[in-house]
């Protein structure tokens, strides 16, 4: 679980983004967060992903659009399919 890189693309005013961030923090997980409104790199990566809304969470090779607790937990456990 701890070996996978975790990246969170968010905005400061997004309630689902706050939930995702709080969940990862409660789990004691290290993650990198990019605010796509305030970070040039965040905007660039977000556009490259073709994302349309936040949050977007990357856990290893698994991408999760939105705050989907079950998918996040499966990805952390290593049982989620990529894509």
Image (tube, grey):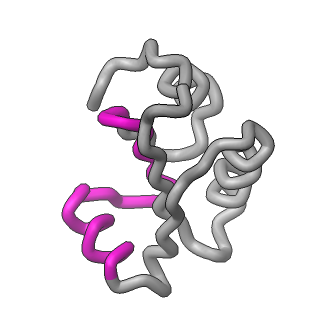
Q: Does the magenta stretch include residue 69?
A: no
The quadrant in which the C terminus is found is top left
- Above or below residue 70? Residue 57 is below
Count of numbered marks: 0
Q: Name the residue rendered at 35%, 60% in the picture.
A: 52
Give above or below for 51 relative to 11. above
Q: Is residue 49 magenta?
A: yes
- The single residue placed furthest to the top in the displayed view is 79
Q: Position of residue 38 (x, y in %)?
A: 48, 86
Q: In this orientation, which residue lies closer to the viewer: 69 or 22?
A: 22
Residue 2 is left or right of residue 60, and the answer is: right
Name the one closer to the observer, 68 or 26: 26
Describe residue 47's horizontal placement relative to residue 76 as left or right. left
Task: Return the residue found at the far front.
Answer: 3
* Residue 76 placement (x, y as % from top left): 54, 26
Q: Which residue is drawn at 41% across and 44% down?
A: 58
Q: Is residue 71 left or right of residue 51?
A: right
Question: Which residue is depicted at the point 45% across and 18% down?
Answer: 78
Furthest residue toward left: 48
| Residue at 20% over, 63% down | 48
Q: Residue furthest right?
A: 26
Q: In this view, does 25 lie above or below 18?
A: above
Query: Could you tell whether 69 is left or right of 37 in the image?
Result: right
Q: Looking at the figure, which quarter contains the N terminus?
A: top right
Pinpoint residue 64: horizontal percent, then vertical percent: 44, 39
Query: In x, y percent, where is residue 6?
Result: 47, 46
Instruction: Examine the image and state in which quarter residue 70 appears.
Output: top right
The residue range painted magenta reads 41-62
């Amino acid at each position: 679980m701890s070996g996978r890189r975790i990246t969170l693309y968010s905005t400061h005013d997004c309630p689902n983004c706050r939930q995702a961030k709080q969940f990862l923090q409660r789990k004691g997980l290290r993650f990198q967060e990019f605010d796509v409104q305030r970070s040039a790199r965040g905007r660039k990566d977000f556009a490259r992903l073709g994302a349309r809304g936040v949050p977007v969470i990357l856990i290893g090779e698994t991408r999760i659009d939105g705050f989907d607790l079950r998918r996040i937990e499966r990805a952390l456990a290593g049982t989620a399919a990529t894509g």
